[in-house]
Amino acid sequence: MSGIFRFSGDEDHFLGGSLHLSPGSCAGAYLPARKRLRISAPSVFSGFEQKQTSIDVLPDECLFEILRRLPTGQERSACACVSKHWLNLLSSITRNEVNESVQDVEGEGFLSRSLEGKKATDLRLAAIAVGTSTRGGLGKLQIRGSGFDSKVTDVGLGAIAHGCPSLRVLSLWNLPAVGDMALSEIAKSCPMIEKLDLSRCPGITDSGLAAIAENCVNLSDLTIDSCSGVGNEGLRAIARRCTNLRSISIRSCPRIGDQGVAFLLAQAGSYLMKVKLQMLNITGLSLAVLGHYGTSVTDLVLHGLQGVNEKGFWVMGNAKGMKKLKSLSVMSCRGMTDVGLEAVGNGCPDLKHVSLNKCLLISGKGLVALAKSALSLESLKLEECHRINQFGLLGFLMNSGLKLKAFSLANCLGIRDFNPESPLPSTSCSSLHSLSIRCCPGFGDASLAFLGKFCHQLQDVELCGLNGVTDADNIVSAVSICHGRTLESLNLDGCKNITDASLFAVSKNCYSVNDLDISSTLVSDHGIKALASSPNHLNLQVLSVGGCSAITDKSKSCIQKLGRTLLGLNIQRCGRISSSTVDTLLESLWRAFGNGGVTS
């Protein structure tokens, strides 16, 4: 025993082995700690080592209870970064399941998120739901999937529903795996939805729309595009409950017909302001209901309604209920004829903007009737209306009211050139400021000269793809002389017979032009030089000479001179301008353009 008490700890005892004393062998003895050996000896406790404990072994029920009691949103976001499993658990916690003592103040929906293609997955939606909940709240979400390869399902949208009650705008495009379950959860958990866009979502049916109608009373803008599962009952549910609806757009939904559309228009026509019906299996009945009940409609778009005949448009106009209609766009509707157009003009006294595209039965007679009846008309756009000829065009301009400001004609094959010897009408169209003629093969120098004299206050002139417009009779020069003090924008893109002579006239006569497009013409270095040395000190802001093969490096100094005022320059497809010249222009014009306005 004396040897034990004399132990000082400086000697190494029992080298090469280990000492094991049973608990009762030396009762009351004091044993100081041994020094750690440089080479560890085997321990008798090695067989009893415990494995490291992980929180992952806890069941989901326990983790759920822990995570829902996290005190702040920042801590929930931090925990969501631990693993996908934790992220999924956190995203499944609804606002009602968060512990009341730690519940954060909900944001007002300032944040906006967009997912497209492969980035659109359930996992990213879960991260958005957790991450935005305490950073102002998610107000707008746009998901653009990739068709049948899309990885967005009801689970991902369920996470958004649980974590983003402030959501107001939702767009779902091309998501075949999303169905009524997701839309129902969104409707119940996000009652503040104001704008809903559903496009190519075949899994969504009338039940999903009914859930929206039941819970989202603030819905004001609804778009349904190519949703094969949505039918008439879904529209009926929307019409019954969504009294704040102001805009409706329905396109290519085969199960939607007159029963749904007519019911919706009859119920909501008094407060609907924008209506867009495209490629639907409806008849003139729906248009008749619209004409009678659409008392608040201001914007109307009708595209591809093959089942609507002339009578449908006639009744819509003569019902005279759409007195507030301001904008009308009709495309590929064979029922739109001269009779229907006249009826619409008579029944809609406040009509200001009309666009007719591929209306093959519209002729000059209908245009004249429209001009006489729609006295508030400000703009008319015609495209691929082949029965309209130059006489119909002239008749419309002669009879239009004093408010007409813009006229556009594109791809109308019935237009022929005016007779150069035809006398000018006694009246003129002094209110027209914008004239656009595009790709009308019959439109030539005589027509341009006639319109240039007939319309005295032109500011924007667009003549694109007109091979009949040339410099032969100095027509462009005559127009520039007539409108030199008012012309601000001149577009001669694709007029392959325009030469430097036109630029000489512009540089000499036009004082206010700031936007000039002479792409794909015969303009050369001489024309650019004329612009740069204009006695009127042109204030050009945009110059486009793309595809002008006669412009070379010799124009570099002239373009640099014009660059003092330029905000945009297009020199694409100018094969004779070298890359070194392009680099020089980029360097010299960079300061003027700021972020680089040279396109080469």
Image (spheres, grey):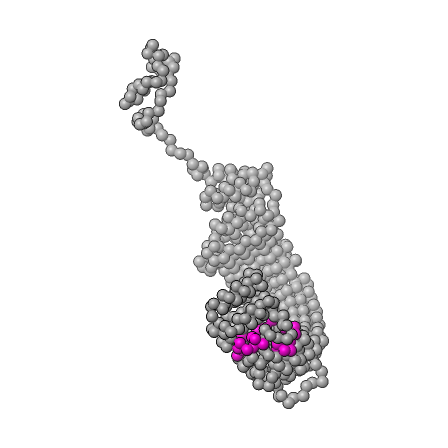
Does the segment drawn in magenta span residue 547? no
The tally of labels here is: 0
Does the segment drawn in magenta span residue 508? yes
Q: Residue at x 54, y 65 (%)?
A: 588
Q: Residue at x 50, y 48 (%)?
A: 127
Q: Can you name the residue that lies furthest to the top here?
A: 2
Q: Residue 109 or 330: which is nearer the viewer?
A: 109
Q: Residue 246 or 266: which is nearer the viewer?
A: 246
Write down the region rendered in magenta: 506-530
Q: Residue at x 71, y 85 (%)?
A: 426
Q: Toward which corner of the image does residue 268 lie, by quadrant?
A: bottom right
Q: Residue 481 or 432: which is nearer the viewer?
A: 481
Q: In the picture, which quadrant includes the N terminus? A: top left
Q: Toward which corner of the image does residue 383 lie, by quadrant?
A: bottom right
Q: Toward which corner of the image does residue 593 lie, by quadrant?
A: bottom right
Q: Is residue 404 visible?
A: yes
Q: Position of residue 589 (x, y in %)?
A: 55, 65
Q: Position of residue 247 (x, y in %)?
A: 63, 62
Q: Is residue 325 left or right of residue 205?
A: right
Q: Residue at x 51, y 46 (%)?
A: 91
Q: Position of residue 251 (x, y in %)?
A: 55, 66
Q: Is residue 448 visible?
A: no
